[in-house]
């Protein structure tokens, strides 16, 4: 295991947010959009470079390589394939994150990278023992991940097919995988902030 191997970040942010009423990438929280926050979290967690896959909304994102997925309507699978194809050849592994989970912070990313440095080739953040996001995958598995990413399925098909490869990384104490899918989700999230509780794990 090369402990100095480069870890890229991949943020999936192409959807239209049909239930939310606007692209999630454009939602602003505490002065930054969710796509900006997602890029910052991956950078702060130790990912360089960071690739962002966009689709319904094309925005300029500082500090990231933006990739347009013209097939974003087909689901997450096409966005994952587009992002994986844009990774630099020097990246030995990638941390994949979703734009709509603003309470997943940099410490969860750091834990995945630490697991990789200990020998894991696939590491998945868990909450209550259940696998969620983010996910780290080493380059040796990326071709199969891309091949099984179809429709609205991202890396899940690969992970379910190879449970023996997966290293679970508990992140309950530093993150929350709750996503923002509806206006009610967003209002509840912002309401917690206004009440003075932490907006997200960092």
Image (spheres, helix red, strand yellow):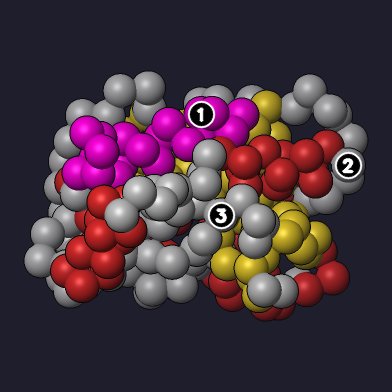
Residue visible at 53% across and 39% down in the picture: 202
**Vertical placement of 102 versus 114: above or below?**
below
The kind of secondary structure the magenta stretch mainly shows is helix
Residue 9 visible in the snapshot: no
Position in image of residue 192 (x %, y %):
33, 58
Q: Sequence order check: which comes first, mark 2 or mark 3?
A: 2
Q: Which residues are magenta?
A: 28-46
Q: 149 or 25: nearer the eye? A: 25
- The residue pinned by badge 2 equals 118
Q: Secondary structure at mark 3?
A: loop
| CA–CA distance in space, label 2 to label 3 | 21 Å
Residue visible at 37% across and 29% down in the picture: 65
Q: Secondary structure at mark 2?
A: loop
Position in image of residue 145 (x %, y %):
60, 61
Mark seen at residue 169:
none
Q: Sequence order check: which comes first, mark 2 or mark 1?
A: 1
Q: Secondary structure at mark 1?
A: helix
- The residue pinned by badge 3 equals 175
Q: Tell me if 61 is positioned left or right of 80 in this view.
A: left
Position in image of residue 53 (x %, y %):
34, 45
* Neighbour tally class for label 1: few under 14, some 14-19, many 20 plus, Cα within 10 Å: some
- The residue pinned by badge 1 equals 43
């Amino acid at each position: 295991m090369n402990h100095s191997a480069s870890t890229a970040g991949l943020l999936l942010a192409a959807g239209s947010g049909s239930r939310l009423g606007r692209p999630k990438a454009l939602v602003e929280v505490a002065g930054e959009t969710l796509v900006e926050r997602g890029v910052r979290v991956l950078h702060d967690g130790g990912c360089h470079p960071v690739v962002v896959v966009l689709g319904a909304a094309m925005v300029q994102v500082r500090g990231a390589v933006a990739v347009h997925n013209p097939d974003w309507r087909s689901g997450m699978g096409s966005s994952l394939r587009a992002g994986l194809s844009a990774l630099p050849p020097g990246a030995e592994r990638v941390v994949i994150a979703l734009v709509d989970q603003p309470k997943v912070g940099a410490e969860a990313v750091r834990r995945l990278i630490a697991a990789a440095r200990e020998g894991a080739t696939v590491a998945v953040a868990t909450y209550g023992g259940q696998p969620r996001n983010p996910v780290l995958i080493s380059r040796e598995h990326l071709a199969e991940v891309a091949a099984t990413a179809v429709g609205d399925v991202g890396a899940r098909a690969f992970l379910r097919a190879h449970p023996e490869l997966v290293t679970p990384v508990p992140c309950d104490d530093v993150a929350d995988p709750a996503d923002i899918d509806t206006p009610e989700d967003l209002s509840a999230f912002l309401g917690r902030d206004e009440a003075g509780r932490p907006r997200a794990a960092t």
